[in-house]
Image (cartoon, rainbow, N blue to C red):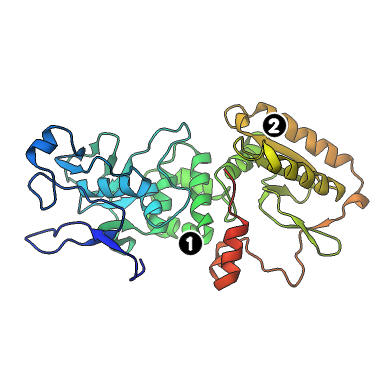
Amino acid sequence: MSEFMPLAAGAPPARGIGPREGIEAGLVWPLRVGDHEGPTPWQARAGQWRKTGWGLHVPPDTPVTARQRVVEAAALWPDGVVTGWGALAWRGARWFEGTAPNGSSLPVNINIGIGKGPRRQGELATATQESVPPWAIERQSSIRVALSIWAVAFAMRYATSVVEAVKAFDMAAYDDLVTIEELRRCTEAVLGTKTGVPQLREALELVSENSWSPQEPLMRCVWCLEGHRPMPLANRPVFDLTGRHVGTPDVIDIEAGVFGQYEGAKVHLVGAQRSTDIRQDAVYRDLGLEGVTMVADDCSDTRSFIGRLHAAYARASRRPFEERRWLLEPPAWWVPTVTVEQRRALEGTQRDRLLAYRRPAA
């Protein structure tokens, strides 16, 4: 956290009296009745402060954001370690908002160690008695939080499916928090036989470091696991034969010459963006590529998408090789950004331009 970031009052001392630790301005640390600046007994009984659990309260107008939910969960077990999606959200990961695919709220996961009290507090938090090695723990703004690599591994191990595990990794890699090689080494060296490691290993064979939205890993997994086609590459720039960048499809199978795009209902299917998408698809086809589009309805029932996928492969197979007028090999002036390490190496305006370019629409 920057030393110039404004702070608010966070966690009180673990023992005795003293100043409260700083926390990011805008977040609210839960307080008990009788605490300085806390609710009065009457305010607590009358519901004038929102109860977060175990006698803790926050003012009723406190926004319920992902980061605020992490604060409220961490206050329940001050000696615990926030992990999973909560730790990634706390570290600024854009796509971890604590919601399940069906829109329901996910509890914040807290590692509390063996024999340390109740393991669940309503829908707010779930505690696990898994141990966390000391090297994997940091304290940031009043909260003990797992390192990114440990939090990603936890999210993948406890994901409801391999596809959700892939999505967890891809979205952590979006913010350059972890690489495939880092997680692979951690899995083999540290995780051993912990719960969910087989699922983690399976997902590691499907992940990408260059997904730009949560729908892209879903499309890639459906493409490969249900469509029985080679796993496509994510967000690889396409160039014409002169070296001009013509676009970056969401996914592409470079051997077959088939690309895929995800079109969300809020942006891609209406207005000017729809016209832009149609023109872009025409450019790809002029270069000899065949495309397939996934829409929101395909996420719940993939059969129609798989049919369109096979049709795209059939069209591509009928194209003569001479019609391929596209390249994936970038020209010398192009700055590669398809891996986390490449992006970590960017500085200043280069990184700002990348972040602006790949900012996906919902």
Q: Nearer the viewer, residue 268 or 255?
A: 268
Q: Which circle, 2 or 1, is nearer the viewer? A: 2
Residue 3 in the image: state x and y as whole percent: 33, 71
Disc 2 versus disc 1: distance between alpha carbons? 33 Å
Q: Residues within 10 Å of mark 2 (few under 14, many from 20)?
A: some
Does label 2 or label 1 sit earlier along the sequence?
Answer: 1
Element at label 2: helix
Q: Residue at x 16, y 39 (%)?
A: 54
Per the rendering, the mark at residue 182 is 1
Q: Quadrant of the C terminus?
A: top right
> Is residue 237 found left or right of 9 in the rendered image?
right
Per the rendering, the mark at residue 306 is 2
Q: Residue at x 42, y 45 (%)?
A: 97
Total labels: the figure holds: 2
Q: Nearer the viewer, residue 235 or 311?
A: 235
Residue 144 in the image: state x and y as whole percent: 27, 57
> Is residue 306 found left or right of 257 in the rendered image?
left
Three-letter amino acid code at the position of disc 2: Ile
Q: Residue at x 69, y 55 (%)?
A: 236
> Above or below — where is 33 with respect to 179?
above
Q: Are marks 2 and 1 in contact (CB under 8 Å)?
A: no
- Whether residue 228 is visible: no
